[in-house]
Image (cartoon, grey):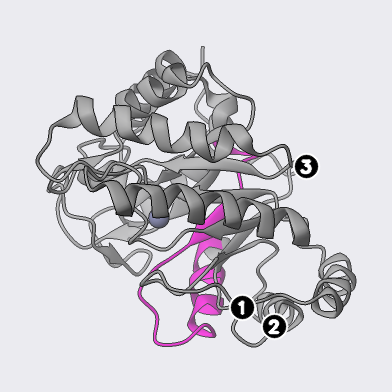
Amino acid sequence: MYSKYLTVREEYIILRLGCHLSIAKGLDKTAKMAGEVRANTFQYFTRNPRGGAARKISEEEIKLWKEVRAAENLYPIVGHLPYVVNLATPKEGIHKFASKVLLEDLERMEAIGAEYLVVHPGSHLGEGKEKGIYRIIKALEESLLQFSGKTSLLLETMAGQGSEVGSLKDIRAIMEGLGNPESLGVCLDSCHLFAAGYDFRSSQGLEILIEEIHEMFGLDKVKVFHLNDCKFPLGSKKDRHERLGQGYIKKEGFLNILSNPAFQEVPYIIETPVENYKEYGEEIEQVYSWLE
Ligand SMILES: [Zn+2]
């Protein structure tokens, strides 16, 4: 069904390509930073990566942000929960905290008109996948299912490091456990998928991945694609991002994804290890030059 492999993107589809940016100086500044690096979408941490309190976003900041966002034509806006939020933890207090933070951040994202909130499904910490999945479902019942706004939650596919939950199959189990709510989607990550063993450097390898997505939850559930190269070889299960073209995925792997009909309308967010955000300008230029 998706076997028609294109070598170039369809020109009439706008490529939504951006990167991870900081909102520490205010959302309007972030919108300007995006413009500086030629990003037409961006992702930010909803709070300090180590957890902690969320920065208060005032009414004035939201008003200014909405104006700058429209002027810069930014879409979609993606929040990312800090890595310490573990929805699968067996520790009761931390589990409660995780659902609370998730619900709060969905509400904070709704307030600024952001489209998606990405979360790593979590780590079961040795209790086994089944229990981990059960706890994620419980946490989402107490947060996502209590939320009535327009922002959607996206579960990210993981590399399978340690006790991580987050294979395509795990994500399907979570979706089914919640009764497949409309507000729940998926964020793919090229580095994580490659580390999990999907070799999309060949078109046949990419077809295998696409077929699996199709079987598990369907391509329409894929709302964001993290574009990262991988520091370690195929199937390493190690989540270590690398600059685009400098890791094991290389230009061929990225071109396969970017030019496949299955992923032409998905926004791409780069989260590669850069010294400062301006280097994302080089990463974005790299992608555009590959597509020429
Ligand atoms: Zn992530």
Q: Residue furthest front?
A: 93
Which label sits on residue 12? 3
- Give the percent coordinates (x, y) of residue 47: 51, 70
Q: Place residue 182 in its image quadrant.
A: top right
Which label sits on residue 269? none
| Mark 3 neighbour density, 10 Å: few (under 14) some (14–19) many (20 or more) | few
Please give the residue where the numbered disc 1 appears in the rendered image. Answer: 23
Q: Amino acid at mark 3?
A: Tyr
| Mark 1 neighbour density, 10 Å: few (under 14) some (14–19) many (20 or more) | some
At 39% from the left and 22% from the top, the residue drawn is 172
Residue 276 within the magenta-colored segment of the rendering = yes
At 21% from the left and 25% from the top, the residue drawn is 130
Viewer can see residue 219: yes
Please state the total of marks drawn on the protein image.
Answer: 3
Give the structural element (helix, strand or loop) at label 3.
loop
Which quadrant of the frame does ligand 1 lie within? bottom left
Give the structural element (helix, strand or loop) at label 2.
loop
Residue contact between numbered discs 2 and 1, judged by CB atoms under 8 Å:
yes
Which label sits on residue 26? 2
Q: Amino acid at mark 1?
A: Ile
In the rendered image, the vertical position of residue 188 relative to residue 108, given as above or below:
above
Q: Which residues are magenta?
A: 263-287
In the rendered image, the vertical position of residue 226 relative to residue 45, given as above or below:
above
Viewer can see residue 292: no
Q: Nearer the viewer, mark 3 or mark 1?
A: 1
Q: Amino acid at mark 2?
A: Gly
